Every structure is written in structure tokens, then in C-alpha cells.
Image: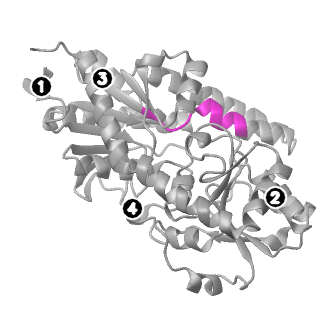
Amino acid sequence: MLQIHINNRKLRFGLINLNILRITSAFSSLEKIPSARSLPHETIYHLSKAQRELGHKLIILAGQGHQNANFEEVDGMKVYRAFNRGRFLNSSLFLFTLTSYPKICSLINKYHINVIHGHGIFTGLAPIIFKKLSNTNVPLIVHCHNTAKGVLTADLLNDLLIFRRKKKYYENRFYLGNYIMWEKAIYNSADAIVAVSNSLKRELMNFYSIPSEKIFTCHNGVDLDLFQRTEASNLRGKIGLKKDEKVVLFVGGIGFRKGFHHLIKAASYIKKTNIPIKILTIGSYGHRTLFKGLMKKYSVQDMFLHVGFVSQKDLPTYYSLADILVLPSIYDTFGNVLVESMACETPVVATAIGGIPEVVEDNINGILVQPRNSRELSDGILELICNDEKRKHLGEAGRKIVERKFTWRQSAERLDSIYSAVLERSHRPIN
């Protein structure tokens, strides 16, 4: 059994529990997380909970929460707060770095931290500065959920090419440049990077020339106790759906990179079939006026029903109500909504881009279509809507795949193996 010294004590991988300092822009209990999907809040919460259940001690350093408390306990995890409420990205990151540095120094010493695990650019520069000044052997691991270049390029190119908003394009270019500057500094200074998909790993290698051996893949998971098929007949009448209407569900941030404009155009093709279909949307509108204008252009306003925000505990009922979930992304590194829908035995139609093919197997647990192709998207939706038997088969297969490959416990165990590899690389083994 491999043994190493950490903070003057022996550690045997797989047998001892670690003290982990998690740094993130936000952290709250499950009940306070809205279903907007604009930030990976639920991913970080579930991952932390699963690691705690494995026996690790989680210390969270996050941006200011709902109550702006400096300290609170969330489901048995100690959560400390640092200020990150600047007007712009640079000021927010600068403030977070400035206010988090003394707290990082204090928490590492107080809790004998073994691993610093940050999330994205809001890891900030404070742990990097701490490592350089203190010459500590505590490794810094940064969890990458997406890249700034991938996210903002998808958004700004659509602004320029679809809506001809040149001013917005140049604003986004400035924002993108600042974002990338922070990303490069943090990722290049980290001891290791965790990517949520193999696709994202390749993206990091291509964008920032990060060596392959520094990046580890760890897929997200899903709460199988929460997300499972449930009775949803009462919900149909409650939200005003007709008895004969088929339901296509969209969950997430309603914006360009989720391909919502392509779904609107696909709806115009579907409408010509006269099949009664309602497209149910859950999440936040990024460009409400622009998308409403597109709906009007294609005369499909009556096909869309926007529900708004839905709590995590209520989401399984909506997945169970839906005949299919649709995710027409033009940029997506994983797609949490896919595994949630699959867990509820609702098949998916999604674009074959980014990390999505690592979750959806074509004609096994869903249908994959080419991105930016509204006609193919409409064909995929209609193929499942018109075939009850295939929908049932793909839905049941989806649940089995999620149980086998995408649980939070599996994600937490994968992180254990990553921690072991990084700690072994950072310390000299003692026989």
C-alpha cells in the first residue's frame, strides 16, 4: 500500500479521509438552487455531498450567499464566505482574490487541508499566490465545467451573425479577452485540472496548450433518488396543457449556446405536420425580446409554453410529464439535463457536439442530430413523438445507462483516484 506524508501524518490511499478545501463562486443548499443552469451550482453541491458521504471533510470557501453570512453550515459542510460582488468580471475576481487570500491561509492551517479544489476562474488567484509564498505541497486542483472561449464565442458569434448586433459583439470580445486572461493564469498554475468530459479535455489542450497528463476527466452525475419516473398527470392540467398534446421539454438557460434559436425554427417545420405538440421551457431567458421576435417571425408563439424557474425537487415531475427532452446546443461540455431526463426514463433528442455524445448514444438512449440543423432537429423530435414504442424503449435504456455510468458516488470515487494520482505526483513515496 502506497504511503506518503501530508501535513506530518501518513496517508494510505483509499483508507484515509481527506480534508478538502473547495473554492467556488457560490454554494447553497439544494432548496436554494434554481433550475436556471447558468452556473454549475447543483453540480458542486451534489459532488461535495457525495464526497462527504465517502468520509471526506469538506470545507467550502464561496462567494457571498443569499444571507451574506460569513459562515454557515450547509448539510453538514462548513461554508465560509468571501466577497465577490463586483460590477464587472475583473472587479469581482479581484475582490474575491483579495478577500479570500487571508481566509485560505487560515482555513488551510486550521483544518490541515490536504487538497485545494477550485471551480473555474472563480478559484481566483489567491490559492496560487498562497502556494508560491508559502511553498506548500498542498496541491491545487481546478475543476473545469467549460471554457470561456467556448462559451462566449458561441454567444458572440450568434449575436454578430444572426442578429447583426455589432456593439454587443465588440462588448463580448472585450469580456472574452479578460475571461481568457484569468483562465489561462489559473489553469496553467494548477497542479491538475478536472474536466467534465473528454471533449472538454481536448478543448483545454487545444485552447491553452495544457499537456494531456495534467488533465483528468470526471463526468458529472445525477441524484438517482431524486430523479426517477413519477406520477405527473395532475401537472398537465395545472399548467394548462391539453389532453392530446405531446410535450417536448427544454430545460436550461434559454440562449444561443443552447441552440434555442434552432429549436424555434425546428418548431416551424413541426407545425406543418399538424401534430399537437407543446414545447415546454424551464429556465431563464437570456434574450427574451430577440427570441420572442423569432417566434413571431416563424408563427410558432402558440407552440411554446414558458414555465420559468422550477425547484430541483419538482423537476422530476416535469421530466416525467414530457414525452421527450430536447437539447439543441451549439456548445455543451456535458449536459446535466440529459442524465436527469434519462434517470426519469424520458428519452432525449440532442446535438452531437462537445460532451453530449459521451452521454447520449444514438438510437440507444436517445437520438443525436447535427448542430445548427433545424430540419434534422425537427425530424429527430418527430421520430420519437410518433413512435410510442421507441420512446419507451429508449427511456428505459437511458435509466439503465445512468445507473451504470452517471451517479454522483461514481463521480466522487473518480475524484478519489484523481486526488491519489496528483498527491502521488506531488510527494515522495515512503515504503
Magenta segment range? Answer: 143-154
Residue 353 lies in the magenta-colored region:
no
Which residue is identified by label 3? Answer: 422
Do the residues under discs 4 and 1 have CB atoms within 8 angstroms?
no
Above or below — where is 265 with respect to 319?
Answer: above
286 sits to left or right of 225 = right
Tell me the distance, in whole angstroms, between the alpha carbons under discs 4 and 1.
Answer: 33 Å
Residue type (three-letter) at the residue carrying disc 3: Val
Do the residues under discs 3 and 2 have CB atoms within 8 angstroms?
no
Which residue is identified by label 4? Answer: 30
Mark 3 or mark 1, whichever is nearer to me: 3
Do the residues under discs 2 and 4 have CB atoms within 8 angstroms?
no
Q: Circle 4 — which element? A: helix
Name the spot of residue 24 as percent of width and height, x first.
39, 42
Mark 4 or mark 3, whichever is nearer to me: 3
Above or below — where is 59 with respect to 97?
Answer: below
Residue 151 lies in the magenta-colored region:
yes
- Label 2 Cα neighbours within 10 Å, binned few <14 / some 14-19 / many ≥20: many
Tell me the distance, in whole angstroms, between the alpha carbons under discs 3 and 2.
Answer: 46 Å
Classify residue 403 by image quadrant.
bottom left
- Label 3 Cα neighbours within 10 Å, binned few <14 / some 14-19 / many ≥20: some
Tell me the distance, in whole angstroms, between the alpha carbons under discs 4 and 3.
Answer: 30 Å
Q: Earlier in the sequence, mark 2 or mark 4?
A: 4
User: Residue 264: which numbered mark, if any?
Assistant: 2
Name the spot of residue 77 as percent of width and height, x first.
24, 52
Which residue is identified by label 1? Answer: 7
Q: Earlier in the sequence, mark 3 or mark 2?
A: 2
- Label 4 Cα neighbours within 10 Å, binned few <14 / some 14-19 / many ≥20: some
